Image (tube, rainbow, N blue to C red):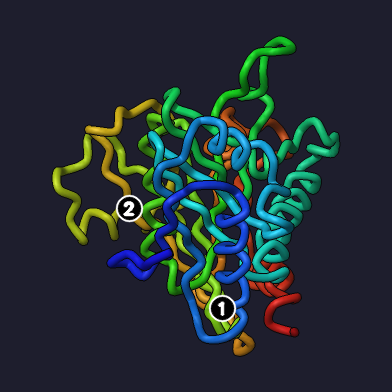
Amino acid sequence: MSKSRDGYVVHHFSHFELLCACAKILVESLQTKSANQWIVVLGLPQSAIGKLDEDHSCLGGVEYRFAWEGNAGLIKIVPSFEHDSVTDGFTRVLDLHLIGMGLVSATSRKWVATTTYKPTANKGKQADQGFLPPPRRPSAPGLPPGRPTLIIETGLSESLSQLRQDALWWLSNSSGAVRIVLVISISKRKDRVFIEIWQLAPPNSPRPLTRAYIQTLCQQSPNIPPLVQQQAASQQAYCAHEIEISANGVTGAPLTLPFVAVYDRPPAQGEGDIVLVEQDFLDVTSDLLCS
């Protein structure tokens, strides 16, 4: 076991007992001084990839998210209950807004949790959560679903650089079918939560994106991401909104999530954009900031 230039633990796979021990050491270190929640695993055989992907008990009770390409994997350790609580809180707040629009049936609001998405045979990734609207559901039993429209990636604030890379992964590996990635980073002291909204710029945007042009996009209300596919080589992603939540209040609210981007269809009568206000963010983080 060693460390990479980014401070990630690097583990050369031989068998699961050693990988499990490595994960448990990392969990223990996260409870004290460490802020690294990542394990880079090299030399993974296909059988081990399959087990890490499908059997989330294989690390001896350590909760994690898994991504891989070729024979290299990246494991994100979930450091605390509060991280899951914040992610789950967002799903519940979004559900309440949709229910308020009349989308009451559970079939109208499908969250895919840590479902693995595989853009090619040799790579795949799990998010912390994803929203799959009815138009993206399988048209018949046994067929694969479409990509989620909204992805949530949660981690420590010290992991923000990697979380942003995760956001870009979802946008590029879905050809833009993932419309919005909600990046949630939580401070090690659990006293602040930072949220970034990542999405693609329109295909006709200037290259490269300028700060002034991004500001123009962010001032649009609602700021709807492109509803067309864009191949990875032509994409330009940017942070469309930032929010900070602490015991002192919320900076950056409200946040508007365009209905057409989340639900993959125009709003019907009684439906509209999802507007998250200050109280929504305080509700989402109540377990964290009150603990």
The picture places residue 43, in percent across and down from the top left corner, at 41, 42
Q: Nearer the viewer, residue 262 or 51?
A: 51
**As drawn, 7 above or below 64:** below
- At 62% from the left and 57% from the top, the residue drawn is 20
Please, what is the three-letter code of the amino acid marked with disc 2? Answer: Tyr
Q: Is residue 79 left or right of residue 74?
A: right
Dot 1: element: helix
> Disc 2, disc 1: CB below 8 Å?
no
**As drawn, 107 above or below 43:** above
The label number, if any, that marks residue 29 in the structure image: 1
The label number, if any, that marks residue 238 in the structure image: 2
Q: Nearer the viewer, residue 136 or 79?
A: 79
The mark nearer the N terminus, 2 or 1, is: 1
Q: Is residue 119 left or right of residue 117?
A: left
The label number, if any, that marks residue 83 in the structure image: none
The image quadrant that residue 268 belongs to is top right
Q: Find the distance from the CA under tag 2 to the CA under tag 1.
A: 33 Å
The picture places residue 22, in percent across and down from the top left corner, at 55, 63
> Tag count in the figure?
2
The picture places residue 238, in percent across and down from the top left corner, at 32, 53
